[in-house]
Image (spheres, helix red, strand yellow):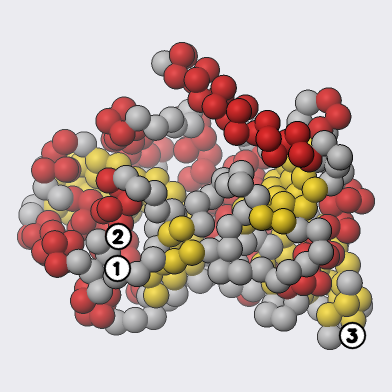
Amino acid sequence: MRYNGCMIVGKRCDDAALWDEIVHDLEGHPLQLWGWGELKAAHGWRAHRILFIDDEERVTGAAQVLTKHLPGPFKRLNYVPRGPVWHEGSESETLEALVHYVKQHLPGTVLTIEPDDTEIPAVKGWQASPNTILIPRTLILDLQRGEQDLLNDMSKKTRQYVRKSGREELTVKRLKRPEDIAKCLTLYKQTAKRAGFALHDDLYYQDLQTLMGDSSIIFAAFHSEKPVAFLWLAISQKTAFELYGGMNDEGQALRANYMLKWHAITKCKEWGIERYDMNGLLNDGVSTFKQGFASHEDMLAGTFDYPLSKLYPLWVKGLPKAKLILRKLKSLRK
């Protein structure tokens, strides 16, 4: 694998500070930061950080590969969330070097990537996958635009609700303490029950705050000194990425989610973050709410697989059925 005439090889990185510095320098996504890998490692995955270095010791790219043990001959799933990250022009060589490293050190059934890019180069062996983890259809705000431009790009109703909720007796605070996170999780559980989606256990969210450090941002809207809505982001130097959010009935009546999201957007802009990613659009009420904040949508490249085993076709066909069974089992436990 050569880039600008130089050979590129993958090397393991065990230095958290160096890793995050490189991810930030390459304008990488927050799910490629060290802390996200540590969170996943604490909850059933393993994290491997690979730097791609040319023969002049220049870093051309990086990939945080999350691995999950699979039963029997399937061995291992390798997954790169919102990565790899790379210097412009080194995409093809980085993908080739990633495959070479994984084949050598992380053999399994499949290597799956979901880049934070609108397209990836056509590299031999890679194929589009139907087994999406992170939704590619999303909405990304350009925070380099002025606040008035961002407001003008909203739907009329959203703009009205942002201003109306801003006049309510609501205050926004950034939360960090475990007891404050617990209050947000109470809101989140109410939201999940109302909308019918599954949650991690409480420890997962507490670990997220601890392990992501300053890259984990929680804003909550308070009314009468009680939280009524919250919004949880992961941030890197360039990108803010919505993770979770929720509110109670009082927050819903006050339209607190409008004021809260606008606060998060403007605060990220103030911090110099350039992109605000709302993390996926479906055909549901939450997506309709998100779509009110802009007049456009974004489509990322999507999910791509590099088969590593002859068992890959079984994996592709069997994974949707396995997910369905797991969802049914979770619903039975409730």
Q: Mark 3 — residue?
A: 5
Q: CA distance from mark 3 to mark 2?
A: 45 Å
Nearer the observer, 153 or 6: 153
Kindly state the secondary structure of the residue where label 2 is placed.
helix
Q: Nearer the viewer, mark 3 or mark 2?
A: 2
User: Nearer the N terminus, badge 3 or badge 2?
Assistant: 3
The spot of residue 27 in percent (x, y) is: 59, 72
Q: CA distance from mark 1 to mark 3?
A: 43 Å
> What amino acid is labelled 1 in the image?
Ala
Specify few, some or many for label 3: CA neighbours under 10 Å numbering under 14, 14-19, or 20 or more: few
- Whether pointer 1 and pointer 3 mark residues with C-beta atoms closer than 8 Å, the reply is no
The spot of residue 96 in percent (x, y) is: 83, 65
Q: Mark 2 — residue?
A: 291
Residue at image point 57% right, 46% down: 133
Q: Is residue 258 in view from this perspective?
A: yes
Nearer the observer, 7 or 227: 7
